[in-house]
Image: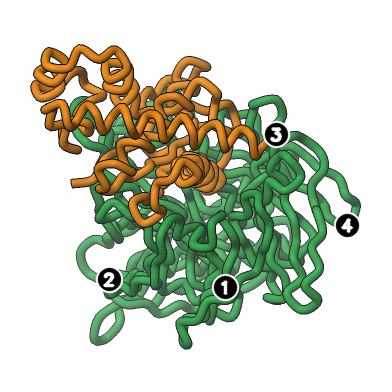
Chain colours: A green, B orange
Amino acid sequence: MNINILPINLVLLMLLCLVRPVWAELTIEITQGVDNPTRIAVVPFEWQGIGGLPEDIASIVAANLSRSGQFIALDEGNMMSLPSEQSQIFFRDWRVLSQEFLLIGRILPQLKSGYKAHYELHDVFKGTLVVEGDIKVGKDQLRDAAHLISDKIYERLTGVKGAFSTRIAYVAVDRTEGKEDQFHLKVADADGHREITVRDSMEPLLSPHWSPDASKLAYVSFEGGRPAVYIQDVRTGKRDKVPSFKGMNSAPAWSPDGKKLALVLSKDGNPEVYIFDIASRQFTRVTRHFSIDTEPSWSADGKSLIFTSGRGGKPQIYRKNLVTGQVERLTFDGDYNARGRLSEDGRYLVMVHGQQGVFHIAVQDLKRDRLRVLTQTQLDESPSIAPNGTMLIYATNEGDKGILAFVSLDGRVKSRGPAKFGDVREPAWSWR
Amino acid sequence: MELTNSFKNALVALLLTAVVGCASTGGSDTDSSDVASGENGYGAGDRAALEVDENAASLATQNLLKVTTFYFDLDQATIKPTSRAALQAHAAYLVENGGSAVLEGHADERGTREYNLALGERRAQAIARYLIVLGVPSEQLETVSYGEERAIRRSHDETAWALNRRVQLNYGQ
């Protein structure tokens, strides 16, 4: 039996290898998972319409769950049957394969257009239905349905909201010998698929940051030879330039209510943090120090800003309470701590942590005041936390290229998305 | 100490201004475009000027004006003593000839992109302040920081990093 299956798998693998570079710049591979991942079989969903389906929901769900590191999805080749409804399930078969959960489903065409996806999660040991549901999507939204199902299953089995329906923005650079670098601001699903280009430029593009409703990006563009902050609607492409000044116009960070941007200007002689009110277009100065103040980021309640400052001689992360005006230093461990981001509950601070010229991503538990280095790769940068607080994405170097990688906040799960073309950097995870 | 230093600098600047002034009255027409191309070697105009003017001080000034890149130490925005002579020549030139200069600040790849942008800005501003102390009107100067985005050398080693931590002085049109 196994001997028969192996060559088919090999052929499939070869086919996959052929197809891969075509569809995505970001392909994610898991390099390290949890010790005891949950074993789940995701059976190919039955298609009850005519012709083929453009997407394979089951494989998208299986890849999503596996990528979290908390699940191991059974290879389709090892399945003894492919049930699509409860009456077709022989739980004994799945127990033999040591599966803990079984996800089955079917997809029905909708009257006008689009699909209805029905999914059922079964507990293999108990032989019971855990949860079922229907998701209706438009004709180009099968991947959305797959991500939504992944979110539901993940939340049901881990108790934590899924973050599979989120998106990631990043900057890709085309570097050709003898030619000027080209910069592309891109957006893709959290699994790296459905990549679109938001902005192309011959001048640097930097520091993308999502609006809380995930409809817009704020970023820095050097077009025209001067830096300025832009706000761009991702779907329509409509752009708004934030009023710019002599010197730096940089590091935009959206407030949790979406009404303000924290950013950095050097118009008053030195890089300082300001708040820009989008509706009134007024600036308010936040920091006041002769050293560098930059990389602002909001707490989830919008009442404080963290930022990097060189005021102690070396870059360290500080927090300013916007109500009382009080400033406190948060990081003490290491000679370079910068670009901090807070988890939504405010307990964890992730940052770029440098020790004697070596830069990694670290997380500091602000409650227990303990710092933990999460990565061992090279020149690690730009950590951005998933909205559910489980994983973060960051930029690192492999060979001579920038790639994006993931690590869980507890350091147990690691995965990476190798760059197919050019350099990828500065990932930003959407808030939802 | 600070005062005496800046006084000395101002004096040097005055002297240099006088020297450059002599050079231009001596028939050499060094316009700003010649200086802008100075980093690549002598422009045709420069060479002609050198033949006409035998003044050694002028020759020194010409050579100093060809230095348009100023390097910095790691995580520092302090002007190195070795950069001062050339900056004084540029200050004198700007005072004498007017025109604008853009100070382009850069950093090496280590550390975060935004902090490096700020560091590049601080370096450019340090040069700008020095030129202003030497008498250049601030309206003639502009700073732009590219942080680590425009590396001279891309390798990940000390040599590349040292070359990338810099401010480039570019004369405007």
Amino acid type assigned to the residue bearing label 4 in the image? Lys
The mark tally for this picture is 4
Q: Answer few, some or many: residues within 10 Å of disc 1's Cα (few below 14, many 20 plus, some between 14 and 19).
A: many
How many angstroms separate mark 2 from mark 4 (CA)? 41 Å
Q: Quadrant location of the C terminus of chain A? A: bottom right
Q: Which of the two discs, 1 and 2, labels the residue nearer the N terminus?
A: 2
Chain on which label 4 sits:
A
How many angstroms separate mark 2 from mark 3 (CA)? 56 Å
Decide if residue A92 is in sight here: no
Residue B113 in the image: state x and y as whole percent: 50, 44
Q: Which of the two discs, 2 and 4, labels the residue nearer the N terminus?
A: 2
Labels 1, 3: front one: 3
Q: Answer few, some or many: residues within 10 Å of disc 4's Cα (few below 14, many 20 plus, some between 14 and 19).
A: few
In the rendered structure, the answer to whether residue A426 lies left or right of residue A362 reads left
Amino acid type assigned to the residue bearing label 2 in the image? Gly
Q: Answer few, some or many: residues within 10 Å of disc 3's Cα (few below 14, many 20 plus, some between 14 and 19).
A: few
Chain on which label 2 sits:
A
Labels 1, 2: front one: 1
Labels 2, 3: front one: 3
**Quadrant of the image occupied by residue A344:** bottom right
Reading the image, the residue beneath label 2 is: A237
Chain on which label 3 sits:
B
Reading the image, the residue beneath label 1 is: A275
Q: Residue at x 30, y 82 (%)?
A: A110
Residue A34 in the image: state x and y as whole percent: 71, 41
Q: Secondary structure at mark 4?
A: loop
Q: Secondary structure at mark 1?
A: strand
In the rendered structure, the answer to whether residue A262 lies left or right of residue A140 reads right
Chain on which label 1 sits:
A
The answer to whether the residue labelled 1 contacts the one labelled 3, judged by CB atoms less than 8 Å apart, is: no
Q: Answer few, some or many: residues within 10 Å of disc 2's Cα (few below 14, many 20 plus, some between 14 and 19).
A: few
